[in-house]
Amino acid sequence: MKTAMSRPEETERLQDLGRASMQIVHDLKNQLNGLKLYATFLRRRIEKTERPGDEQETIGKLITGLDRAAEDLSALVRYAQPVDLKKQPGFEVDKVMSSICSNLNDTNTQIACDAGSGSVQGSFDHFKLTDALKWLSIGALKYRQTGDGADGITVKVAQTDTERAVVEWSGLRKLDQDPLHSFAGVDEVKMALAAKIIDAHGGSTEFTDRKFVVVLPLSG
């Protein structure tokens, strides 16, 4: 008969499992990088010879897949680590969101940005917060409302007062679970990491009324 573990023992076991999992993920990422190196070498060899075009296309797709898998594994590793912020002033939330929307629309997606008329600036980690806002935008597109009457995703950036900015992604469909904390797939892990980054900045992230809502402090 199994002996039930105490809560401290269970917590320690879970922490050990988490550390082991992250080490496995790290090793897998290294292996993927090695495979990409060989694939890149093979593509260069193919390009120098008169090989069929579909062979070059296939090796290109392989490299793209390896890049995507490595990026997904990196998100898992980043989520497991503490968020180390390097804040700098002059982060323009409105302009960053407009740029993210523009880049996503280059891939034939439907996302509109209403950034208002004034500049919304704060002191943030430029790299990490940009990633967080991008991942939330991609996640919003994944959960957008479809069918008749669906207008795509609209992102609104507003400064509610001198101390806070609000970013809202509207146009999501009704969901039974909170996609920001479901860990149901790679996109959800990235959204959870986005929420963790925003929380580290002293902000908040929630899914409510078919919207993603982010509140960011503009001072401090």
Image (cartoon, helix red, strand yellow):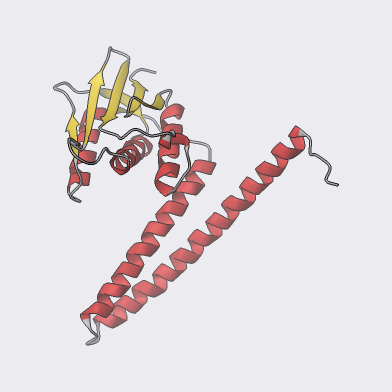
Which residue is painted at 35% across and 17% down in the image? 219
The answer to whether residue 91 of the structure is visible from this angle is no
Residue 210 vs residue 40, the one in the foreground = 210
Q: Work out which residue is located at the far left of the displayed protein and give it.
A: 117
Which residue is painted at 35% across and 78% down in the image? 42
Q: Work out which residue is located at the far bottom of the displayed protein and give it.
A: 50
Number of residue marks = 0
Q: Does residue 32 lie above or below 178 as drawn? A: below
Image-based side of 133 in relation to 191, left or right: left
The answer to whether residue 81 of the structure is visible from this angle is yes
Residue 1 in picture, x, y percent from top left: 86, 47
Residue 9 in picture, x, y percent from top left: 76, 38
Q: Quadrant of residue 164?
A: top left
Which residue is painted at 50% across and 66% down in the image? 31
Q: Does residue 158 lie above or below 13 as drawn? A: above
Which residue is painted at 20% across and 46% down in the image? 109
Tell me the quadrant of the picture where the C terminus can be found: top left
Q: Work out which residue is located at the far right of the displayed protein and give it.
A: 1
Q: Work out which residue is located at the far front of the displayed protein and give it.
A: 148
Residue 114 in picture, x, y percent from top left: 17, 28
Residue 124 vs residue 57, the one in the foreground = 57
Residue 205 in picture, x, y percent from top left: 40, 27
